[in-house]
Every structure is written in structure tokens, then in C-alpha cells.
Image (cartoon, rainbow, N blue to C red):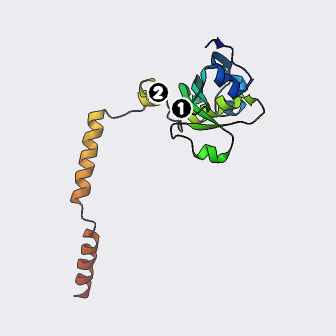
Amino acid sequence: MAIGQLPKTFDPRKLARQGRQYQGSLVLSQFDRLVGSLVDDKGEVQVDLSFSLSEDNRVVLEGHVEAELSMICQRCLEVAKLPVRADLHLMGVLTDEQAKALPENFEPLMFGDEPVELLPILEEELILALPLVAYHPPEDCSAQRYYTTESEDEAQAAAVEAEKERKNSNPFSVLAKLKTDTTIQES
């Protein structure tokens, strides 16, 4: 169970039989597809992986990958440094049928006789963990600090007043007015 340096490629069966664990970091600039969604490629990606065999002797790769990524905040359009973490729960499969039959808490790790590249797996997990819309936390966002005009109580009171007004208005009052206008013209 020694912790070693991250391999570029690996044999999943061999590492699972050995019960290998890996911890380390990779330079963010190596993740080409991920960097395309970011402001810059500065930083590191922390990786913690553990290989094992399941009860039915299938390869299991578990662990996590995390990084602080620079994205554009969609409120203030400034750079936001966001922590992103992806937990890995992969089980080795050789066919699509095996992938469909996996326990629901595992995702497929497709492999064959060739060594598997680690970087694309980690990159895919980080891409899937990116937020759909990037925001600073509200207390750190300049748009939230400088452009908020109402306090929370004022905003809630305005919402209650708008709801009362909506309930009191009759959508058919316009029709009633039209009816009275036509009866006046006919007389």
C-alpha cells in the first residue's frame, strides 16, 4: 500500500491487485480541454487515487481530484477563483454490456490490453465537476456589494406587496370596461 508518484499510463489490473495508492499534483496547463474553459492555466491539480479489487475481482479506482480554478464570475464579470473537486468511483469494464450492469454508485473505466492514460480520466472528471455558471460567493462579489439597492427585508416586503396587488387585480376588468364602453356608444 505504498503511495507513489502519479503514473502517465497504468495497467488497471496490475495496480488493483497490488492495492496501489497514488497522491500527487499535476500542472494545470497539462489539461488542455479543461484550460479552454478557464481564464488561465496557472495552478496545480491535486490527485489522490486508490486502486483495489471488488468482491467479484473487478478493478476499482477511487479517490478525488481537486483544484482552484480561475473562471469569470457571471455577476460581476471579474475573475473568480473557485475550488472544484471531483470524487472518482470507477469500476473496470471491457464491454458496453458490462458498463450498463455496473452498480449505480460506480462509473465505467473502459480498458483493454493497452495501458490506460491517467490524464484524460482526471481531466474528464474535473470538466464534469465545473459549475454550470461561475459565481463568486456573494460576500466576495463586487456586483453583489455595490449594486444591491435593497436590503433583504425591503426586497421581501416588495415581493409581498406585489403578490397582494396581483391577487387584487382582476384580469377580466378590461373586458368589463369594454362592455360598458360599447353599451354607452349604443345608447
Relative vertical location of residue 53 with respect to residue 133 in this rendering, above or below: above
Position of the C terminus, as image quadrant, is: bottom left
- Secondary structure state at the residue bearing disc 1: loop
Q: Which residue is mark 2?
A: 141
- Secondary structure state at the residue bearing disc 2: loop
Q: Residue at x 26, y 34 (%)?
A: 153
Position of the N terminus, as image quadrant, is: top right
Q: Residue at x 54, y 39 (%)?
A: 132
Q: Residue at x 28, y 66 (%)?
A: 171
Position in image of residue 37 (x %, y %): 64, 34
Name the image quarter holding residue 156: top left
Relative vertical location of residue 21 with respect to residue 131 in this rendering, above or below: above
Position in image of residue 3 (x %, y %): 63, 12
Disc number at residue 150? none
Q: Which residue is mark 1?
A: 73
Name the image quarter holding residue 175: bottom left
* Mark positioned earlier in the residue sequence (2 or 1): 1
Along the line of sight, which residue is nearer the eye, 130 or 173? 130
Q: Alpha-carbon neighbours of circle 2 within 10 Å: few (<14), some, or many (≥20)?
A: some
For the image, the number of numbered tags is 2
- The answer to whether residue 159 is left or right of residue 97 is left
Mark 2–mark 1 contact, CB under 8 Å? yes
Along the line of sight, which residue is nearer the eye, 157 or 36? 36
Outermost front residue: 56
Position in image of residue 5 (x %, y %): 69, 14
Amino acid type of disc 2?
Cys
Outermost right residue: 114
- The answer to whether residue 145 is left or right of residue 31 is left
Q: Alpha-carbon neighbours of circle 1 within 10 Å: few (<14), some, or many (≥20)?
A: many
Amino acid type of disc 1?
Cys
Gap in angstroms between the C-alphas marked 2 and 1: 8 Å
